[in-house]
Amino acid sequence: MISLPRLYAIVDAAGFMKTEDLVSFAKELIAGGCTVLQYRNKSGSAGEMLRQALALKINAVGDVKLIMNDRADLCLAAEFSGVHVGQDDLPPSSVRRIIGPDCWLGFSTHNPRQVKEGARTSADYLAIGPVFSTSSKDKPDPVVGLEGVRRARQLTGKPLVAIGGITRANAASVVEAGADSVAVISDLLREPRKSAEEFFRVLR
């Protein structure tokens, strides 16, 4: 079973005009202690995504795992450590055949039925959310709250990543509810290094 850090940082290309800025942001997160970064680009072309992914790969020094959002093919092309897929992407069984046994595979869930189904797949970890209201998705799923995290924890022994509206102010309550890790986008954007360090202090 894989071991997840308390903070699962998401590098969302939507927040950056230039690849250099995206890479600088990622480097600051790594300097702040982040060892897992998911690269997320919901609107870019495959070519743009690959260029940005390769730039991140070159600059991800040390024991840092890079996770590709949605695209198993680009995970392999950029030699990332894993891929994370959602309910509308290829199913985990198909993704596993593409990426092989050694890459990490994450799978998003939003309700107890999906958690149960995800628990039976070859996914290495499950994500549950949105825990709180979030602005990072155009059409977010219904908020599950802390009770949703508790329920998910009861339904799977796989590592559990909570996502959706998580900040330094509420992260501890999410871990106390049963999450192994918290995925964060917005609350890392300002002063990423300092923000990451503060998350790790809160989540000791």
Image (cartoon, rainbow, N blue to C red):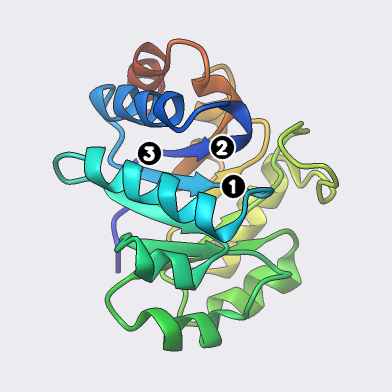
Q: Which residue is mark 2?
A: 13
* Label 1 residue SS: loop
Q: Amino acid at mark 1?
A: Asn
How busy is the neighbourhood of tag 1: few (under 14 within 10 Å), some, or many (20 plus)? many
Residue under the image location 44 percent in, 44 percent down: 181
Relative to 106, is 203 on the left or the right? Answer: left
On-image quarter of the C terminus: top left
Residue under the image location 62 percent in, 61 percent down: 108
Q: In the image, which is nearer the foreground, mark 1 or mark 3?
A: 1
Horizontal and vertical percent position of residue 22: 45, 30
* Label 3 residue SS: loop
Q: Nearer the viewer, residue 75 or 7?
A: 75
Q: In the image, which is nearer the foreground, mark 2 or mark 3?
A: 2
Horizontal and vertical percent position of residue 195: 42, 16
Relative to 204, is 169 on the left or the right? Answer: right
Residue under the image location 41 percent in, 65 percent down: 75
Q: In the rendered structure, which disc, 2 or 1, sits on the residue that comes first in sequence? A: 2
Q: Which residue is mark 1?
A: 41
